[in-house]
Amino acid sequence: MKPKHQRLTLALLAVAAVLGASGLALSALKDQAAFFYAPGDVAKAGPPVGRAVRLGGMVQQGSIAKQPDGVSIRFVVTDGTATVPVSFRGVTPDLFREGSGVVAEGMFNADRSFTASNLLAKHDERYMPPQVAKTEAGPMHETKTLAP
């Protein structure tokens, strides 16, 4: 076999190996990918029941209800066009509250409700950690006017 044909064969084998590795990686990750849905998307297309997804939106005002067991809550996620009832069992993030953004990871049920296994609280662009807010309100950030 000529050197030119050997190089071509090696190049084709390398391309085939890269494509094979990419295919294996994609097939392994397809079950790990969690798709993101807003309540409006769920209202239009219907929820993907029993599949791991993420639901994002705002926690509706007055919707958080703590359950008697002390670790479960129910609340409603809205995007302004539709709402989805959510149940969660566990410790909520510190930033989780009514009127704030939330991303819930979990699965839709047949009744169009959502069972969350994890909550991620989102904050707006004005968010400031409490430690920083205290220092900015302190004496170092007071403004003083100088007399001429």
Image (cartoon, rainbow, N blue to C red):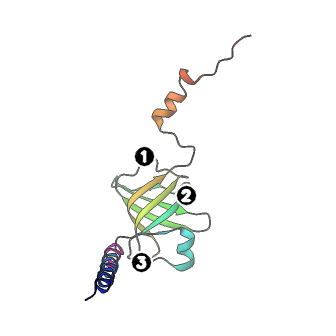
Q: Earlier in the sequence, mark 3 or mark 1?
A: 3
Q: Residue at the location (53% across, 24% down)?
A: 138
Q: Residue furthest bottom?
A: 1
Q: Earlier in the sequence, mark 2 or mark 1?
A: 2
What residue type is disc 3 on?
Val
What residue type is disc 1 on?
Asp
Residue under pointer 2: 60
- Compared to residue 96, the image places residue 131 above or below, namely above
Look at the numbered discs 2 and 3 and tell me whether their residues touch, using CB distance below 8 Å: no
Mark 3 and mark 1: Cα distance apart in space: 29 Å
Residue 146 relative to residue 96: left or right? right
Q: Residue at the location (55% across, 27% down)?
A: 137
Residue under pointer 1: 94
Is residue 30 located in the magenta-colored stretch of the structure?
yes
The image shows residue 117 at horizontal and vertical percentages of 36, 62
Is residue 7 located in the magenta-colored stretch of the structure?
no
Q: Secondary structure at mark 3?
A: loop
Residue 14 relative to residue 35: left or right? left
Residue under pointer 3: 49
What residue type is disc 2 on?
Gln
Mark 2 and mark 3: Cα distance apart in space: 23 Å
- Compared to residue 145, the image places residue 89 above or below, namely below
Q: Which residues are magenta?
A: 23-33
Which of the pair 43/30 is nearer the observer? 30
Dot 1 surroundings within 10 Å: few (below 14), some, or many (20 or more)? few
Q: Secondary structure at mark 1?
A: loop
- Compared to residue 49, the image places residue 84 above or below, namely above
The image shows residue 124 at horizontal and vertical percentages of 55, 49
